[in-house]
């Protein structure tokens, strides 16, 4: 496959041969994540057997497979790698909908429902805080997009977006936003790119 590899004699491969997948994190440390290991030991200890197509009993060979290794370690490396700023497809909440005032709550709910229908993960903040305070609060949570809704957006069935960089784009038709967001997620883009 053209992947660099090394043989590690004396490692803790007690059952049989194994392959470990080692990745470097964002600051260059190496972590063993995934592993596939052949195990001749447990089938023997559990006296396992199966009847083959030849009608004779055979001892199986067990394969241990942990594609992510320890899930906690994998998640830790992933979180650290992205510094909590996940690509849109991986972000726990893809869109935080922020209303300029509470009179925009109905439209915010409508936008949220449409986004959820398309499988997007959404959160609404229609509280009493000013839009500036909402933006400061949600910026710390690192959603892929903040969707800002006010009078103009509600009247025209549009959205205004604010990206993590602070860049903004206004008056995007909701249907266009939905299709562009779907394309970004389906492409597994490494960074939000609609703003």
Image (cartoon, rainbow, N blue to C red):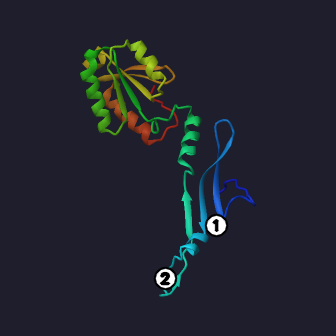
- Report the residue at 60% width, 68% height from top: 39
Q: Which residue is mark 2?
A: 52
Q: What residue is drawn where x is 29% and y is 28%?
A: 111
First of labels 1, 2 by sequence position: 1
Marks 1 and 2, how far apart at CA: 23 Å
Residue 176 or 133: which is nearer the viewer? 133
Task: Point out residue 153 in the picture as x, y percentages from the top left corner.
Answer: 30, 19
Q: Nearer the viewer, mark 1 or mark 2?
A: 1
**Helix, strand or loop at mark 2:** loop
User: Which residue sits at x=41%, y=33%?
Assistant: 93
- Tell me the number on the disc at residue 45: none
The quadrant in which residue 180 appears is top left
Q: Residue tagged by mark 1?
A: 15
| Neighbourhood count class around disc 2 (C-alpha, 10 Å): few under 14, some 14–19, many 20 upward | few
Q: Secondary structure at mark 1?
A: loop
| Residue 113 picture quarter | top left
Residue pictured at 48% horizontal, 30% vertical: 193
The N terminus, quarter of image: bottom right
Q: Is residue 132 above or below residue 143?
A: above
Mark 1 surroundings: few (<14), some (14-19) or many (≥20) residues within 10 A: some
Of the pair 2 and 142, the residue shown nearer to us: 142
Q: Give the residue furthest to the bottom.
A: 55
Judged left or right of residue 104, residue 58 is: right
Rendered position, 14 above or below 145: below
**Residue 141 screen position, x and y as percent:** 47, 26
Q: At which x and y percent is residue 181? A: 40, 34
The residue closer to the viewer here, 43 or 188, is: 43
Q: Is residue 123 above or below residue 46?
A: above
Q: Is residue 169 left or right of residue 12?
A: left
User: Residue 21's x, y, as percent?
Assistant: 63, 53
The answer to whether residue 26 is left or right of residue 56 is right
Q: Residue furthest front?
A: 45
């Amino acid at each position: 496959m053209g992947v660099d590899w090394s043989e590690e004699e004396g490692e803790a491969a007690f059952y049989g041969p194994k392959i470990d997948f080692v990745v470097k994190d964002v600051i260059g440390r190496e972590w063993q994540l995934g592993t596939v290991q052949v195990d001749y030991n447990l089938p023997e200890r559990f006296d396992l057997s199966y009847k083959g197509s030849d009608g004779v009993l055979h001892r199986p060979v067990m394969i241990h497979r942990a594609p992510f290794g320890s899930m906690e370690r994998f998640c830790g490396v992933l979180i650290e790698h992205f510094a909590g700023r996940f690509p849109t497809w991986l972000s726990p909440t893809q869109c935080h909908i922020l209303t300029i005032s509470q009179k925009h709550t109905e439209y915010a709910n409508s936008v949220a429902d449409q986004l959820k229908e398309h499988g997007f993960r959404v959160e609404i903040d229609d509280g009493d805080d000013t839009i500036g305070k909402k933006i400061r609060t949600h910026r710390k949570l690192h959603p892929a997009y903040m969707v800002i809704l006010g009078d103009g957006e509600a009247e025209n069935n549009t959205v205004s977006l604010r990206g993590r960089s602070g860049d903004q784009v206004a008056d995007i038709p909701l249907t266009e936003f939905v299709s562009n967001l779907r394309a970004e997620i389906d492409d597994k883009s490494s960074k939000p790119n609609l703003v």
